[in-house]
Image (spheres, helix red, strand yellow):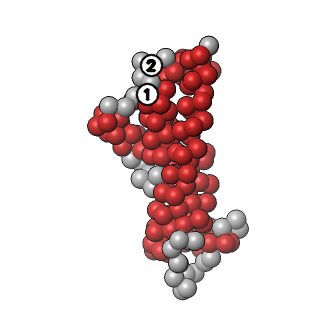
Amino acid sequence: MRVMIRKLFEKLLKVNDTPERTALAFAIGVFLSFSPFLGLHTALGLLVAFLFGLNRVAVIVGVYTNTPWTMAPFYAFATYCGQWFYTLPADMPFHIKDMAGWDFWRKLFSNWTSLWPLIMPTVIGSTVLAVLAAAIAYPISLRLIRAYRKQ
């Protein structure tokens, strides 16, 4: 597994693109990875890479930074952050601040219609956090790519 990951990163870092374009492609992938378009990340990443002529490997590596282990905590946190920008209805059967307790999740999943008020906070929160993640990913990846190519 480590050999495969190492080969993937070597392939990513040895492309003929400039470090800036490679880092941009990775950052766009990171944005799409944390965007609210859950389930469409890979397809959107490939579409954006083809439309703008970006490094497809860099975009896909960025898209896969949000793993199945991080998705649930991320989108829960994104929903929590999204409520700062979008006011939730007062008659909700639960409160976002109680997200850490089992009672919150039991009430949430016992009645699926109660999920509808959470869509806007989730979309807004995940979009804001996706922009933030991409803004952090670009300079870090640019620095790593430049350091690798300097060797």
Tell me how many marks there are.
2
Locate the N terminus and report the quarter of the image it occupies.
Answer: top right
Point out residue 38 in the picture as x, y percentages from the top left corner: 44, 51
Distance from the alpha carbon under mark 2 to that under mark 1: 9 Å
Point out residue 89 in the picture as x, y percentages from the top left corner: 51, 82
Callout 2: helix, strand or loop? loop
Q: Which mark is residue 57?
A: 1
**Image side of residue 105 versus residue 52, left or right:** right
Q: Is the residue marked by circle 1 packed among few (<14), some (14-19), or many (20+) residues within 10 Å? A: many
Q: Which mark is residue 10?
A: none
Residue drawn where x is 52% and y is 45% of the image: 134
The tag earlier along the polypeptide, 2 or 1, is 2
Closer to the camera, 97 or 57? 57
Point out residue 100 in the picture as x, y percentages from the top left corner: 70, 65
Residue drawn where x is 28% and y is 37% of the image: 51
Query: Is residue 112 visible from the viewing direction of this image?
Result: no
Q: Which residue lies furthest to the left in this view?
A: 51
Q: What residue type is labelled 2?
A: Val
Callout 1: helix, strand or loop? helix
Q: Are marks 2 and 1 in contact (CB under 8 Å)?
A: yes
Camera-nearest label, 2 or 1: 2
